[in-house]
Image (cartoon, grey):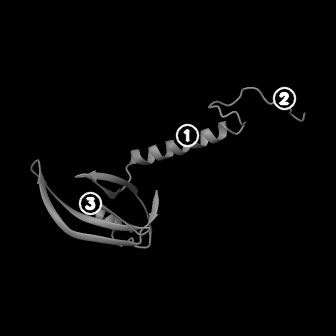
């Protein structure tokens, strides 16, 4: 979903090593609708958000528990996240269309109504 970014705070780059591979990441905070969301981003992802204050960016917002406390986080949506979002919208539309006849059922009626004007 696209969100308007009000403010961005990018922390200093930190380095680490895992399984013999070195990596660099930044702690990034963004403000959306007055609330702050945080993430640890690699350099290529930091470049996606740098300078985007006042712009709409496609993000996934979520909550994560750490040491018994809930934190507001964000991430860039993956292809699977986008597919899941599209499927959820299709399912919602199908429920709306199938419920137009007022039956509340999940399947459309095969027979036309008896009160057709012709």
Residue 91: image tag: 1
Q: Secondary structure at mark 1?
A: helix
Against 46, residue 19 (above or below) is above
Locate the C terminus by quadrant: top right
Q: Which residue corresponds to the image point at 84% horizontal and 29% vertical from the top-left?
A: 114
Residues 70 and 90: in front is 70
Residue 108: image tag: none
Q: Secondary structure at mark 2?
A: loop
Q: Earlier in the sequence, mark 3 or mark 2?
A: 3
Q: Furthest-front residue in view?
A: 68
Label 2 CA crowd tier, 10 Å (few <14, some 14–19, many 20+):
few
Callout 1 touching callout 3 (CB < 8 Å)? no
Q: Earlier in the sequence, mark 1 or mark 3?
A: 3
Q: Quick check: 34 left or right of 100?
A: left
Label 1 CA crowd tier, 10 Å (few <14, some 14–19, many 20+):
few
Q: Quick check: 7 left or right of 87?
A: left
Q: Give the image location of residue 5, x and y in percent.
A: 41, 68
Q: Earlier in the sequence, mark 1 or mark 2?
A: 1
Residues 23 and 91: in front is 91
Q: Which residue corresponds to the image point at 46% horizontal and 60% vertical from the top-left?
A: 2
Nearer mark to the viewer, of 3 and 2? 2
User: To which residue does mark 2 refer?
Assistant: 114
Callout 1 touching callout 2 (CB < 8 Å)? no
Q: Furthest-right residue in view?
A: 118
Q: Give the image location of residue 1, x and y in percent.
A: 46, 56
């Amino acid at each position: 979903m696209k969100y308007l970014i009000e403010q961005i705070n990018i922390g200093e780059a930190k380095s680490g090593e895992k399984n013999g591979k070195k990596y660099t990441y930044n702690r990034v905070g963004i403000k959306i609708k007055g609330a702050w969301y945080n993430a640890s981003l690699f350099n290529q992802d930091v470049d996606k958000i740098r300078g985007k204050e006042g712009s709409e960016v496609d993000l996934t917002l979520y909550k994560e528990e750490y040491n018994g406390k809930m934190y507001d986080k964000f991430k860039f949506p993956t292809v699977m996240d986008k597919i899941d979002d599209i499927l959820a919208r299709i399912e919602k539309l199908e429920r709306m269309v199938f419920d137009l006849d007022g039956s509340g059922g999940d399947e459309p009626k095969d027979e036309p109504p008896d009160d057709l004007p012709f």
